[in-house]
């Protein structure tokens, strides 16, 4: 798996109505450079960090998708089904490996990637690259057993007073805890709008969270949660200029905000909840854009929209002339 343990995030891409507009937005926000083609890979200092994909069907959501590594994608998608989830697309052989899109029992969509030739991210955990993903869920009794079964995660609860409002996931075979965590699950509580669906949120590391918020606004995006100090860093939640939502994280260790890092979990959680609920309409709009696993989207995938999007993302044999592999430099 090229260094990616089973269940570790290994790739992220965004489906957009206009790839050119996405290049302008993310190019200025993160300093990314881009390849050509309908599945345009993004690079930071020559290393691949993500991709922008054009939507062929307007019914498909405008959304960031995170992909988890799988050493055996057939076995893993089998566990998705047996644990109560849905395999929306695939497993689909593509250039560089095999991919699938799946939905958990609450409808949150994620990708799965097995890449013996192309493993995904060329860089992560560095400024302007992927650093974290979180599942926003309403029913822990449904999703917690699902992800433990599918990915065999070890878990650690980091909510206030050791509660399970925030649960982080560590790959099987590692010692569970914050140092080995690759993602997590947050409960959607009463402070969030009732219409907010279960969904994954993708984070990118930035050197300055406040500057990122200013830049997003200037470029035509929206700030759904203003820069906020938490025990894990300064974070903000945005949508881009076409409606795809994502988050950024400013690491205290990088920026030296030791005082902010010392805030209590309870205070940070309360502030997060208040800010997240300040504009209910914005929050619902962003979350709905991320909810790609409802019945209509599954039906679209069955009719070819989802498979077509996957083919454009990774390049099937039929599309090999126009689409490369996720990590290949054009």
Image (spheres, rainbow, N blue to C red):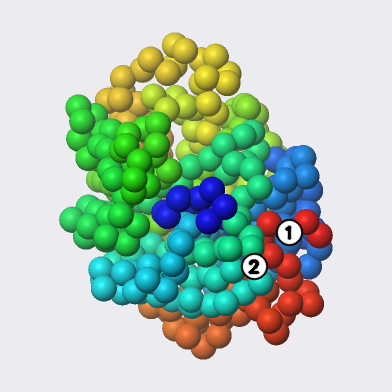
Dot 2 alpha-carbon crowd within 10 angstroms: few under 14, some 14 to 19, many 20 or more: many
Looking at marks 1 and 2 on the same chain, the residue that comes earlier in the sequence is marked by: 2
Residue 307: x %, y % from top left: 56, 79
The residue tagged 1 is: 328
Residues 225 and 251: in front is 251
Can I make out residue 27 in this image? no
The residue tagged 2 is: 96
Residue 50: x %, y % from top left: 64, 53
Tell me which residue sits at (65%, 78%) in the image: 316
How many numbered circles are shown? 2
Tell me which residue sits at (65%, 38%) in the image: 128
The answer to whether mark 1 and mark 2 are in CB contact below 8 A is yes
What mark, if any, has residue 117 been given in the picture? Answer: none
Element at label 1:
loop
Tell me which residue sits at (53%, 40%) in the image: 131
71 to the left or right of 325: left
Element at label 2:
loop
> Where on the picture, by quarter, is residue 13?
bottom right
Tell me which residue sits at (57%, 77%) in the image: 93
13 to the left or right of 276: right
Residue 175: x %, y % from top left: 32, 37
- Which quadrant is home to the C terminus? bottom right
Q: Is residue 124 above or below residue 255?
A: below
């Amino acid at each position: 798996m090229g260094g990616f343990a089973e269940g570790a995030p290994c790739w992220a891409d965004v489906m957009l109505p206009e790839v050119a507009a996405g290049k302008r937005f993310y190019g200025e926000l993160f300093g990314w450079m881009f390849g050509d083609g309908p599945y345009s890979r993004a690079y930071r200092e020559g290393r691949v960090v993500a991709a922008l994909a054009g939507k062929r069907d307007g019914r498909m959501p405008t959304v960031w998708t995170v992909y988890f590594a799988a050493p055996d994608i057939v076995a893993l998608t089998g566990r998705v089904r047996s644990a109560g989830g849905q395999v929306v697309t695939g497993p689909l052989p593509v250039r560089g490996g095999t991919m699938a899109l799946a939905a958990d029992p609450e409808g949150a969509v994620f990708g799965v990637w097995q890449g013996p030739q192309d493993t995904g991210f060329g860089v992560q955990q560095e400024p302007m690259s992927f650093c974290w993903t979180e599942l926003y869920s309403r029913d822990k009794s449904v999703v917690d057993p699902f992800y433990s079964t599918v990915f065999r995660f070890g878990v650690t609860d980091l909510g206030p007073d050791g509660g399970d409002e925030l649960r982080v996931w560590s790959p099987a075979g590692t010692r569970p805890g914050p140092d080995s965590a690759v993602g997590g699950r947050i409960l959607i509580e009463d402070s969030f709008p009732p219409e907010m669906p279960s969904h994954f949120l993708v984070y990118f590391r930035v050197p300055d969270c406040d500057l990122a918020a200013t830049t997003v606004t200037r470029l035509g995006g929206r700030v759904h949660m203003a820069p906020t100090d938490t025990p894990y860093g300064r974070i903000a939640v945005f949508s881009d200029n076409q409606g795809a939502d994502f988050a950024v994280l400013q690491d205290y260790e990088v920026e030296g905000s030791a005082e902010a890092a010392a805030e209590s979990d309870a205070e940070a959680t309360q502030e997060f909840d208040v800010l997240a609920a300040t504009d209910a309409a914005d929050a619902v709009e962003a979350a709905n854009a991320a909810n790609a696993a409802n019945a209509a989207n599954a039906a679209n995938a069955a009719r070819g929209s989802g498979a077509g999007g996957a083919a454009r993302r990774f390049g099937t044999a039929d599309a090999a002339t126009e689409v490369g592999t996720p990590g290949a430099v054009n």
